[in-house]
């Protein structure tokens, strides 16, 4: 945390210095004011993967991260529905002499779909038929890392590619 030991004036100076610095700076911080001031691009390390948000300041990163999570959940929901349809066809016609070939083809398609889906659902995914209360709790848990509630294990690594000139020392 580059700003833990600094007073408000020094924190502001560091944030402005990084924002004005002409080269790339990697900042790992939970100080949202610093991130808002200093960052033009964000790279978040989460779940063992790096997700890049180029050309996005901190506030836009937060909105985009939430939108990406919603898109992942929607995609996964569609994939689950498709997998259920394929499995229903396989169960119904797998032993049928006339549709055995189609059932085998759907088994292969289902295997590919399950590989694409991965071993775990995305955070916030709630299976169809789950109560409204459980769905709201799951969606709340998915956004628990929203502004103000960063978990240090998922701290965003932030690269700031900033503009013109460097600032002076705090006075």
Image: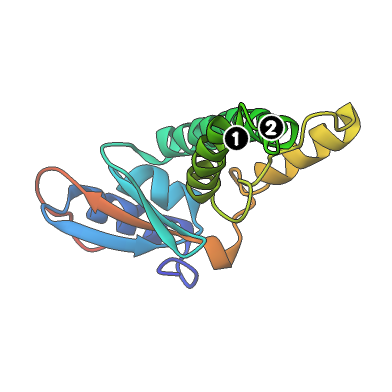
Verify CB contact (< 8 Å) between mark 1 and mark 2: yes
Residue 100 disc label: 1
Q: Is residue 2 left or right of residue 40?
A: right
Distance from label 1 to label 2 (Cα)? 5 Å
Q: Which residue is depicted at the point 69% across and 32% down?
A: 96
Image location (x, y in percent) of residue 43: 35, 52
- The quarter holding residue 61 reads top left
Q: Please, what secondary structure does the residue beneath circle 1 have?
A: helix
- In the depicted view, which residue is nearer to us: 33 or 57? 57
Where is mark 2, residue-wise?
96
Q: Is residue 23 left or right of residue 54?
A: left
Asked if residue 101 can be seen in this view, the reply is yes
- In the depicted view, which residue is nearer to us: 82 or 24? 82
Which quadrant would the C terminus be assigned to in this image?
bottom left
Image location (x, y in percent) of residue 166: 13, 54
Which quadrant would the N terminus be assigned to in this image?
bottom left
Q: Which residue is depicted at the point 41% across and 41% down?
A: 58
**Mark 1 packing: few (<14 Cα in 10 Å), some, or many (20+)?**
some
Q: Which residue is depicted at the point 73% across and 45% down?
A: 141
Image location (x, y in percent) of residue 157: 38, 60
């Amino acid at each position: 945390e580059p700003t833990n030991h600094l007073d408000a004036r020094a924190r502001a100076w560091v944030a402005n210095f990084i924002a004005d610095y002409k080269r790339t700076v990697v900042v790992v911080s939970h100080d949202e004011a610093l991130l808002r001031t200093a960052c033009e691009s964000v790279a978040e390390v989460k779940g063992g993967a790096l997700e890049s948000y180029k050309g996005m300041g901190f506030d836009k990163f937060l909105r985009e991260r939430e939108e990406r999570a919603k898109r992942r959940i929607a995609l996964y929901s569609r994939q689950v529905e498709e997998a259920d349809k394929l499995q229903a066809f396989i169960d119904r016609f797998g032993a049928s002499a006339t549709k055995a070939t189609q059932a085998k083809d759907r088994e292969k398609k289902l295997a590919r779909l399950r590989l694409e889906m991965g071993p775990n659902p995305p955070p916030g995914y709630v299976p169809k038929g789950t109560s409204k209360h459980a769905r709201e709790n799951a969606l709340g848990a998915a956004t628990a890392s929203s502004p103000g509630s960063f978990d240090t294990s998922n701290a965003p690594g932030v690269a700031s590619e900033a503009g013109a000139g460097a600032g002076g020392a705090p006075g």
